[in-house]
Amino acid sequence: MQHIKNYINGQLIEPVSKTYLDNYDPSTGKVYSYIPDSDEKDVELAYAAAKNAFKEWSILPKDKRSQYLLKIAALIEKNLDKLALAESIDNGKPLKLAKTVDIPRAAANFHFYGTGILHYASHAHSMEDSAINYTLRQPVGVAGCISPWNLPLYLFSWKIAPALAAGCTVVAKPSEVTPMTAYLLSELCVEAGLPAGVLNIVHGLGGKVGNAIVSHKDIPLISFTGGTTTGKHIASIAAPMFKKLSLELGGKNPNLIFADCDYEKMLSTTMLSSFANQGQICLCGSRIFVERKIYDKFKTDFIAKTKALVVGDPRDEKTKVGAVVSKPHQEKILSYIELAKQEGGKILCGGNPIKMSGEFSEGYYIEPTIIEGLNYDCRTNQEEIFGPVVTITPFDTEEEALKMANSTIYGLASVVWTQDLTKAHRIANNIHAGIVWINCWLLRDLRTPFGGVKASGVGREGGFEALDFFTEPKNVCVKL
Ligand code: NDP
């Protein structure tokens, strides 16, 4: 069986401890490879390599750095099929989704920052004839990047690409639950000839490797995407060390559906925003609020479409919903469905684990689930479930919809469905979320700032904001 390796100082190497963890295929529930059980010794090696590489990488002309990133982007595109298959096996997601969304977007991240850095400029401020100020933007140093399992390569590259473009060197940890695409990326970096130590990938557990990165005294910047509880823990270590921090955390995103929407477009997109990637996208809309005038119609149509979703073998073209990522995660989702029942929720469809046949009989499958009849402020409607589970709730007025939408500790993304332009903009203005999609979902322009408010995080990724994050501004004031 394959042993994944760490990527340190340009080499693919074993962990110092020589110990490994099991890596599961969620679609079969079977171990299919092994992942380094690294610890602070491996992080130290990675840090030393990154520190050493920083001297040259940080002053390498931008166009040279750009060429490396574009080469990596091209290699990801060239290896699309292999990477998509690896991500589907690692994560349980439909192969088609990996092929059409995750992997192309990972290539796009390298492409975007490989070209973006060429156009990144700093500011100058003239004080008429007394002085001139200009701002130097210098790479911060060795960046620590930690990413989750739900969109493994996409979110990993979303951090690494701007860090490298900005001139930082990197010590990165992908999720231990889905390490394979990050490993394949390290092979592509070797093939691209990326100088040794510029990117270092250390595999292993969050509590060991992640913690060692976050608490490393000489890593001045942490870019983290993951759960809110982990984010809070990381902030408690990094903040007293005055590290630069970007935290992209959980969500409990509302969908507001008004009676005047383009109904068919809304319905088909709501299917995706509810159940794509088994509902394991931080941007999925898990609380659906529907104007009462169309509530019954929506409920009937939504249930019918949900029941028709094909759940099963992620590699089958017909599959729309694959396996959830792990056994503990499956148990967590099912426990929330039980909680919903205890809170008075009515399961309109789904609600159960699915026992598949043959090689998939031990896989982690859950029926796409719709629940109604819950108060907007109950736990099921307030806590992140992160699975194929949505609640639906009717509303009468815009004020009521907004009150329910804004009632959680989270504020990542939101969706508004209406043909009334003024109402759409008014709601966008009043909703507590870092992202508002109007009559669409998951459309991304990489130039825009990405991230949440409240417990969904601090800092912004995407666009030039990410390049700002990985560089330190220094103002130079020159007396004329
Ligand atoms: P976790 O917070 O459990 O883990 C995220 C990463 O942090 C993993 O690599 C994990 O390692 C690591 N980690 C865990 N503990 C520590 C620690 N003490 N110190 C440092 N690193 C640690 O999140 P999940 O992987 O479960 O991902 C799902 C969560 O991510 C959801 O809440 C989702 O909403 C959120 N998310 C947010 C996004 C956003 O942009 N706002 C985008 C995508 C997901 P290990 O895997 O070994 O535990």
Image: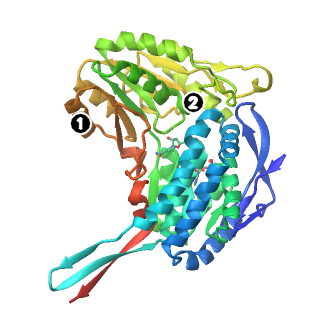
Q: Is mark 2 within 8 Å of ligand 1?
A: no
Q: Earlier in the sequence, mark 2 or mark 1?
A: 2
- Relative to 309, is 117 on the left or the right? left
What percent of the width, then of the height, locates residue 409?
Answer: 38, 39
Q: Which residue is mark 2?
A: 278
Q: Residue at x 70, y 60 (%)?
A: 39
Amino acid residing under circle 1: His
Q: Is residue 330 visible?
A: yes
Q: Residue at x 59, y 66 (%)?
A: 68
Q: Which residue is mark 1?
A: 425
What percent of the width, then of the height, locates residue 161?
Answer: 53, 59
For the view shown, which residue lies furthest in the right direction? 1
For the view shown, which residue lies furthest in the bottom direction? 480
Q: Nearer the viewer, residue 244 or 359?
A: 359
- Relative to 374, is 307 on the left or the right? right
When asked about the image quadrant of residue 320, the answer is: top right
